[in-house]
Image (cartoon, rainbow, N blue to C red):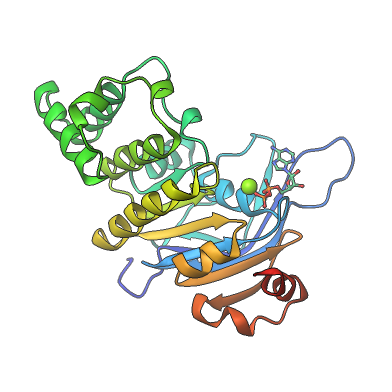
Amino acid sequence: MPDQATPLLSVRNLTVTFPSLHASAPAVRGVNFDVGREKVGIIGESGSGKSTTGRALMRLLPKATRITADRLQFRGEEILPLSDRRMREIRGHSMAMILQDPKYSLNPVMTVGEQIAETAILHEKLSRRAARERTLEMLEKVHIREPERVMGLYPHEVSGGMGQRIMISMMLITRPALIIADEPTSALDVSVRQQVLAILDELVSANNMGLLFISHDLNLVRSFCDRVLIMFGGRIVEELPASQLEQASHPYTRGLLEALP
Ligand code: ADP
Ligand code: MG
Protein backbone atom coordinates (compact mmCIF):
# COMPACT_ATOMS: atom_id res chain seq x y z
CA MET A 1 0.00 0.00 0.00
CA PRO A 2 1.20 3.52 -0.73
CA ASP A 3 2.33 5.43 2.34
CA GLN A 4 4.16 8.68 3.01
CA ALA A 5 7.47 7.07 2.05
CA THR A 6 6.22 5.97 -1.37
CA PRO A 7 6.94 8.67 -3.96
CA LEU A 8 3.95 9.81 -6.02
CA LEU A 9 5.79 8.84 -9.14
CA SER A 10 8.70 6.47 -9.58
CA VAL A 11 10.30 6.01 -12.98
CA ARG A 12 13.09 3.57 -13.84
CA ASN A 13 14.63 3.03 -17.23
CA LEU A 14 11.81 4.73 -19.15
CA THR A 15 12.44 4.50 -22.87
CA VAL A 16 10.18 5.93 -25.57
CA THR A 17 10.56 5.24 -29.28
CA PHE A 18 8.36 6.81 -31.95
CA PRO A 19 7.43 4.70 -34.95
CA SER A 20 9.35 5.62 -38.04
CA LEU A 21 9.98 4.26 -41.53
CA HIS A 22 13.64 4.01 -40.66
CA ALA A 23 15.04 2.49 -37.50
CA SER A 24 14.81 5.47 -35.18
CA ALA A 25 16.69 6.20 -31.97
CA PRO A 26 14.52 6.50 -28.85
CA ALA A 27 13.37 10.04 -28.01
CA VAL A 28 13.69 9.17 -24.31
CA ARG A 29 16.50 6.82 -23.30
CA GLY A 30 16.50 5.01 -19.98
CA VAL A 31 15.32 7.82 -17.78
CA ASN A 32 15.15 7.46 -13.94
CA PHE A 33 13.52 9.80 -11.44
CA ASP A 34 11.06 10.08 -8.58
CA VAL A 35 8.60 12.83 -7.77
CA GLY A 36 7.24 13.31 -4.26
CA ARG A 37 5.01 16.06 -2.92
CA GLU A 38 7.42 18.66 -4.25
CA LYS A 39 8.18 20.71 -7.33
CA VAL A 40 10.54 18.95 -9.70
CA GLY A 41 11.73 20.76 -12.81
CA ILE A 42 12.87 19.21 -16.08
CA ILE A 43 14.99 21.46 -18.24
CA GLY A 44 16.68 20.80 -21.54
CA GLU A 45 16.94 22.20 -25.03
CA SER A 46 14.24 21.81 -27.64
CA GLY A 47 13.99 18.19 -28.81
CA SER A 48 15.74 16.75 -25.73
CA GLY A 49 12.70 14.64 -24.80
CA LYS A 50 11.02 16.66 -22.04
CA SER A 51 7.50 16.66 -23.48
CA THR A 52 7.78 13.02 -24.53
CA THR A 53 8.67 12.12 -20.94
CA GLY A 54 5.66 14.00 -19.58
CA ARG A 55 3.31 12.62 -22.21
CA ALA A 56 4.53 9.05 -21.67
CA LEU A 57 3.48 9.34 -18.00
CA MET A 58 -0.01 10.42 -19.07
CA ARG A 59 0.00 7.97 -22.01
CA LEU A 60 -0.74 10.85 -24.35
CA LEU A 61 1.38 9.67 -27.27
CA PRO A 62 0.45 8.20 -30.67
CA LYS A 63 -0.76 4.61 -30.32
CA ALA A 64 2.18 3.00 -32.12
CA THR A 65 4.73 4.65 -29.81
CA ARG A 66 6.81 2.09 -27.94
CA ILE A 67 7.00 2.84 -24.22
CA THR A 68 9.05 0.53 -22.01
CA ALA A 69 10.23 0.84 -18.42
CA ASP A 70 11.54 -1.35 -15.62
CA ARG A 71 9.24 0.60 -13.36
CA LEU A 72 6.57 3.21 -13.97
CA GLN A 73 4.73 3.56 -10.68
CA PHE A 74 2.14 6.09 -9.67
CA ARG A 75 1.36 6.03 -5.93
CA GLY A 76 2.83 2.56 -5.73
CA GLU A 77 0.68 1.22 -8.59
CA GLU A 78 2.44 -0.03 -11.70
CA ILE A 79 0.94 1.92 -14.60
CA LEU A 80 2.77 0.23 -17.45
CA PRO A 81 1.05 -1.76 -18.82
CA LEU A 82 -2.40 -0.70 -17.70
CA SER A 83 -5.85 -1.02 -19.22
CA ASP A 84 -7.09 2.01 -21.16
CA ARG A 85 -9.94 2.25 -18.71
CA ARG A 86 -7.73 2.43 -15.62
CA MET A 87 -5.42 4.88 -17.37
CA ARG A 88 -8.41 7.12 -18.14
CA GLU A 89 -9.35 6.99 -14.45
CA ILE A 90 -5.87 8.00 -13.41
CA ARG A 91 -5.79 10.77 -16.01
CA GLY A 92 -9.21 12.01 -14.96
CA HIS A 93 -8.70 11.97 -11.21
CA SER A 94 -5.18 11.80 -9.95
CA MET A 95 -2.69 12.90 -12.57
CA ALA A 96 -3.29 16.02 -14.63
CA MET A 97 -1.39 17.82 -17.35
CA ILE A 98 -1.24 21.51 -18.19
CA LEU A 99 0.01 22.36 -21.65
CA GLN A 100 1.64 25.47 -23.06
CA ASP A 101 -1.43 26.82 -24.81
CA PRO A 102 -4.81 26.62 -23.03
CA LYS A 103 -6.52 27.24 -26.38
CA TYR A 104 -5.98 23.58 -27.27
CA SER A 105 -7.31 22.27 -23.96
CA LEU A 106 -10.45 24.39 -23.64
CA ASN A 107 -13.57 23.59 -25.63
CA PRO A 108 -14.11 26.44 -28.14
CA VAL A 109 -17.91 26.07 -28.29
CA MET A 110 -18.56 26.21 -24.54
CA THR A 111 -18.31 29.23 -22.25
CA VAL A 112 -15.74 29.20 -19.47
CA GLY A 113 -18.55 28.85 -16.92
CA GLU A 114 -20.14 25.91 -18.75
CA GLN A 115 -16.83 24.04 -18.93
CA ILE A 116 -15.92 24.45 -15.30
CA ALA A 117 -19.47 23.58 -14.23
CA GLU A 118 -19.39 20.50 -16.46
CA THR A 119 -16.21 19.34 -14.74
CA ALA A 120 -17.80 19.88 -11.33
CA ILE A 121 -20.96 17.99 -12.32
CA LEU A 122 -18.90 15.10 -13.65
CA HIS A 123 -16.38 14.87 -10.81
CA GLU A 124 -18.34 16.03 -7.81
CA LYS A 125 -21.80 14.92 -8.90
CA LEU A 126 -23.12 18.41 -8.24
CA SER A 127 -26.46 19.79 -9.38
CA ARG A 128 -26.42 22.58 -11.99
CA ARG A 129 -27.08 25.16 -9.32
CA ALA A 130 -24.35 23.88 -6.99
CA ALA A 131 -21.95 23.59 -9.93
CA ARG A 132 -22.44 27.28 -10.66
CA GLU A 133 -21.48 28.15 -7.09
CA ARG A 134 -18.50 25.84 -7.34
CA THR A 135 -17.43 27.51 -10.59
CA LEU A 136 -17.44 30.94 -8.96
CA GLU A 137 -15.48 29.56 -6.03
CA MET A 138 -12.87 27.96 -8.32
CA LEU A 139 -12.43 31.13 -10.38
CA GLU A 140 -11.85 33.04 -7.15
CA LYS A 141 -9.25 30.43 -6.11
CA VAL A 142 -7.20 31.34 -9.17
CA HIS A 143 -7.69 35.04 -8.39
CA ILE A 144 -9.94 35.91 -11.30
CA ARG A 145 -11.66 39.20 -10.65
CA GLU A 146 -15.21 39.58 -11.93
CA PRO A 147 -15.78 35.81 -12.06
CA GLU A 148 -19.44 36.33 -13.05
CA ARG A 149 -18.37 38.12 -16.21
CA VAL A 150 -15.58 35.67 -17.04
CA MET A 151 -17.98 32.72 -16.78
CA GLY A 152 -19.87 34.05 -19.79
CA LEU A 153 -16.80 34.32 -22.03
CA TYR A 154 -15.72 31.87 -24.73
CA PRO A 155 -12.12 30.61 -24.77
CA HIS A 156 -11.16 32.87 -27.72
CA GLU A 157 -12.26 35.87 -25.66
CA VAL A 158 -9.81 35.31 -22.80
CA SER A 159 -6.10 36.15 -22.68
CA GLY A 160 -3.42 33.47 -22.43
CA GLY A 161 -2.81 34.12 -18.74
CA MET A 162 -6.52 34.02 -17.96
CA GLY A 163 -6.87 30.83 -20.03
CA GLN A 164 -4.09 29.16 -18.07
CA ARG A 165 -5.74 30.16 -14.78
CA ILE A 166 -9.03 28.73 -16.01
CA MET A 167 -7.25 25.46 -16.88
CA ILE A 168 -5.74 25.35 -13.39
CA SER A 169 -9.16 25.92 -11.79
CA MET A 170 -10.72 23.08 -13.82
CA MET A 171 -7.87 20.80 -12.98
CA LEU A 172 -8.23 21.49 -9.26
CA ILE A 173 -11.79 20.14 -9.32
CA THR A 174 -10.39 16.73 -10.30
CA ARG A 175 -8.12 16.86 -7.21
CA PRO A 176 -4.95 15.54 -8.83
CA ALA A 177 -2.09 14.30 -6.64
CA LEU A 178 0.41 15.06 -9.38
CA ILE A 179 0.43 17.83 -11.98
CA ILE A 180 2.58 17.66 -15.07
CA ALA A 181 2.99 21.17 -16.46
CA ASP A 182 4.62 21.33 -19.89
CA GLU A 183 5.93 24.86 -20.50
CA PRO A 184 2.78 26.32 -18.90
CA THR A 185 4.04 29.90 -19.01
CA SER A 186 6.19 29.90 -22.15
CA ALA A 187 3.46 31.49 -24.29
CA LEU A 188 2.68 34.19 -21.74
CA ASP A 189 3.91 37.75 -21.36
CA VAL A 190 6.54 38.11 -18.66
CA SER A 191 4.20 40.19 -16.47
CA VAL A 192 1.48 37.51 -16.52
CA ARG A 193 3.97 34.67 -16.14
CA GLN A 194 4.75 35.49 -12.50
CA GLN A 195 1.07 35.65 -11.69
CA VAL A 196 0.35 32.17 -13.10
CA LEU A 197 3.42 30.72 -11.40
CA ALA A 198 2.42 32.21 -8.06
CA ILE A 199 -1.04 30.64 -8.35
CA LEU A 200 0.39 27.27 -9.30
CA ASP A 201 2.84 27.45 -6.42
CA GLU A 202 0.15 28.42 -3.92
CA LEU A 203 -2.21 25.63 -4.99
CA VAL A 204 0.45 22.92 -5.16
CA SER A 205 1.59 23.60 -1.60
CA ALA A 206 -1.90 24.23 -0.20
CA ASN A 207 -3.09 20.86 -1.54
CA ASN A 208 0.14 18.97 -0.86
CA MET A 209 0.49 17.96 -4.52
CA GLY A 210 3.50 17.01 -6.58
CA LEU A 211 4.49 19.03 -9.63
CA LEU A 212 6.61 18.02 -12.58
CA PHE A 213 7.44 21.32 -14.25
CA ILE A 214 8.82 21.14 -17.78
CA SER A 215 10.63 24.19 -19.11
CA HIS A 216 13.56 25.28 -21.26
CA ASP A 217 14.19 28.24 -18.95
CA LEU A 218 16.89 27.47 -16.42
CA ASN A 219 16.40 30.66 -14.44
CA LEU A 220 12.69 30.05 -14.10
CA VAL A 221 13.12 26.44 -12.96
CA ARG A 222 15.89 27.38 -10.59
CA SER A 223 13.74 29.92 -8.77
CA PHE A 224 10.49 27.95 -8.92
CA CYS A 225 11.37 24.29 -8.29
CA ASP A 226 12.86 22.33 -5.40
CA ARG A 227 14.83 19.92 -7.59
CA VAL A 228 15.97 20.01 -11.19
CA LEU A 229 16.46 17.19 -13.69
CA ILE A 230 18.57 18.15 -16.69
CA MET A 231 17.75 16.38 -19.96
CA PHE A 232 20.05 16.17 -22.91
CA GLY A 233 19.65 13.95 -25.97
CA GLY A 234 16.81 11.92 -24.41
CA ARG A 235 18.71 11.26 -21.17
CA ILE A 236 18.65 12.79 -17.73
CA VAL A 237 22.28 13.75 -17.47
CA GLU A 238 22.13 15.36 -14.07
CA GLU A 239 19.84 15.87 -11.08
CA LEU A 240 20.39 18.57 -8.47
CA PRO A 241 18.56 20.52 -5.78
CA ALA A 242 17.66 23.89 -7.34
CA SER A 243 19.82 25.65 -4.77
CA GLN A 244 22.88 23.66 -5.86
CA LEU A 245 22.63 24.10 -9.62
CA GLU A 246 25.86 26.08 -9.58
CA GLN A 247 27.61 22.80 -8.80
CA ALA A 248 26.37 21.14 -12.00
CA SER A 249 29.12 19.28 -13.81
CA HIS A 250 27.63 18.17 -17.14
CA PRO A 251 28.93 20.31 -20.04
CA TYR A 252 25.39 21.09 -21.23
CA THR A 253 24.34 22.40 -17.80
CA ARG A 254 27.63 24.29 -17.41
CA GLY A 255 26.99 25.93 -20.77
CA LEU A 256 23.50 26.99 -19.68
CA LEU A 257 24.80 28.45 -16.44
CA GLU A 258 27.58 30.31 -18.16
CA ALA A 259 25.16 31.78 -20.70
CA LEU A 260 23.09 33.37 -17.92
CA PRO A 261 23.48 37.11 -17.55
P1 ADP B 1 11.21 18.68 -25.99
O1 ADP B 1 9.88 18.72 -25.32
O2 ADP B 1 12.35 18.54 -25.03
O3 ADP B 1 11.40 19.85 -26.91
P2 ADP B 1 10.15 16.39 -27.39
O4 ADP B 1 9.89 15.41 -26.32
O5 ADP B 1 8.99 17.14 -27.93
O6 ADP B 1 11.29 17.39 -26.91
O7 ADP B 1 10.84 15.64 -28.61
C1 ADP B 1 11.88 14.71 -28.46
C2 ADP B 1 12.17 14.06 -29.80
O8 ADP B 1 11.05 13.25 -30.18
C3 ADP B 1 12.37 15.05 -30.93
O9 ADP B 1 13.36 14.53 -31.78
C4 ADP B 1 11.04 15.09 -31.62
O10 ADP B 1 11.16 15.40 -32.98
C5 ADP B 1 10.55 13.65 -31.45
N1 ADP B 1 9.07 13.56 -31.39
C6 ADP B 1 8.26 14.18 -30.49
N2 ADP B 1 6.96 13.85 -30.72
C7 ADP B 1 6.95 13.02 -31.78
C8 ADP B 1 5.92 12.31 -32.49
N3 ADP B 1 4.63 12.40 -32.12
N4 ADP B 1 6.29 11.52 -33.53
C9 ADP B 1 7.59 11.40 -33.88
N5 ADP B 1 8.60 12.02 -33.26
C10 ADP B 1 8.30 12.81 -32.21
MG1 MG C 1 8.37 20.20 -25.37
Q: Which residue is drawn at the image coordinates 26% and 20% (left, top)?
A: 152
Q: Is residue 108 left or right of residue 27?
A: left
- In the displayed orientation, state which residue is furthest to the bottom: 247
- In the displayed orientation, state which residue is furthest to the right: 22
Q: Is residue 206 left or right of residue 103?
A: left
Above or below: residue 206 compared with residue 80: below
Q: Position of residue 253 (x, y in %)?
A: 70, 72
Q: Position of residue 96 (x, y in %)?
A: 41, 45
Above or below: residue 135 compared with residue 82: above
Quadrant of the rendered image containing residue 211: bottom left
How many marks are shown on the rendered structure? Answer: 0
Name the one closer to the observer, 255 or 239.
255
Q: Which residue is drawn at the image coordinates 45% and 35% (left, top)?
A: 160
Q: Is residue 259 left or right of residue 153?
A: right
Give the quarter of the figure containing the N terminus.
bottom left
- In the displayed orientation, state which residue is furthest to the top: 109
Name the one closer to the observer, 245 or 4.
245
Give the quarter of the figure containing the C terminus.
bottom right
Above or below: residue 165 compared with residue 7: above
Specify the quarter for ligand 1: top right
Q: Which residue is drawn at the image coordinates 54% and 41% (left, top)?
A: 187
Q: Position of residue 254 (x, y in %)?
A: 72, 76
Name the one closer to the observer, 49 or 167.
167
Q: Position of residue 44 (x, y in %)?
A: 67, 60
Q: Which residue is drawn at the image coordinates 43% and 36% (left, top)?
A: 85
Above or below: residue 38 compared with residue 191: below
